[in-house]
Image (spheres, rainbow, N blue to C red):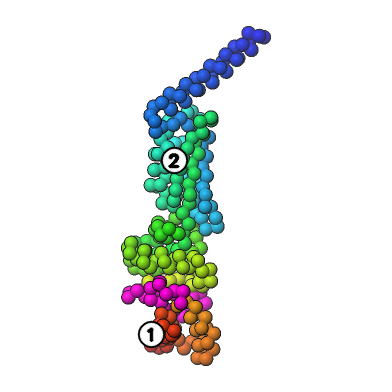
Amino acid sequence: MKRKLLQLLLWLFATVLLGGLVFGYIALQGRARYAIQPNLTRVKVSGVEKDAFLKKDDIMAVLPVSIQDTLPQPISLTEVERTIKSQIPYAKKVSAYVSPTNHQMTVRVDSRRPILRFYTNDGAFYLDDEGTAMRTKSGASIYVPVVKTDHVDSLTIRNTLFPLAQFLSEHDEWNTFFSFIELKEGNRIHLYPRVGDYVFEVLGTSTLEEDLPKIHIFYTKIVPQVGANRYQLIKLSYNKQIVCKRREQL
């Protein structure tokens, strides 16, 4: 009985020693590589709110290791972070680290937060709260303002789309008021309300704070006097004025 117990203890000791040697050997293969137990890998996604659309499964799918493996293996944390950033544009910040006690790798990812969607001749994109454009994600639908335009370059994003997105994101009333928005030539922006067959026009984004409140004046002062069907295009960017065009003039 004692002999069997001694054999069991020796076997357990040898197993632990062998495992330690394997992990140690892997860890010494290079300063940038760490020994991990793949099946213990965990992923944490922060910024998961009602408008977030980056999921843990998205991260797991691109990891350069199979999380089903139970045998220890070496991995470069830099490679893990670089792979996630290159393959998942919705990941804003990625950090990976390994626990020295159980060789568990943890991957933390900050999700980007879309605040606007825009459509161009090149496809559909989201714009996040830092002004970064990214392709829309298949199967994900985020409730944000929608903009249509023929072409978008870095100047359009910096000077028009991002300021517009920031303003709408900071003003809940206007963020949900328009069904969609259209960029036109000459720095004109057409805003289409969810209710009513009107087109509200502003010139650029620098005076949105002064221009959009004029919409209330249009509905409360002008429409009751002339009726709801006389005007269609309402220009808001004139100083202390609202210029309206009749439907038959368009």
Q: Is residue 165 visible?
A: yes
Inspect the magenta stretch and tell me whether residue 188 lies in it. yes
Quadrant housing residue 224: bottom right
Q: Look at label 2 and name its amino acid.
A: Leu
Residue 141 at x, y percent in the picture: 49, 59
Dividing the image into 4 quarters, which one contains the N terminus? top right
Residue highlighted by disc 2: 63
Q: Look at label 1 and name its amino acid.
A: Leu
Q: Nearer the viewer, residue 114 or 143?
A: 114
The residue range painted magenta reads: 184-210
Residue 205 at x, y percent in the picture: 40, 71
Quadrant housing residue 241: bottom left
Give the secondary structure at mark 2: loop
Inspect the magenta stretch and tell me whether residue 201 lies in it. yes
Q: Is residue 21 above or below residue 199?
A: above
Q: Is residue 171 above or below residue 33?
A: below
Q: Residue drawn at (60%, 15%), measured in percent from left and top?
A: 9
Residue highlighted by disc 1: 250
Quadrant housing residue 25: top left
Residue 218 at x, y percent in the picture: 50, 84
**Circle 1 residues within 10 Å: few <14, some 14–19, many ≥20:** few
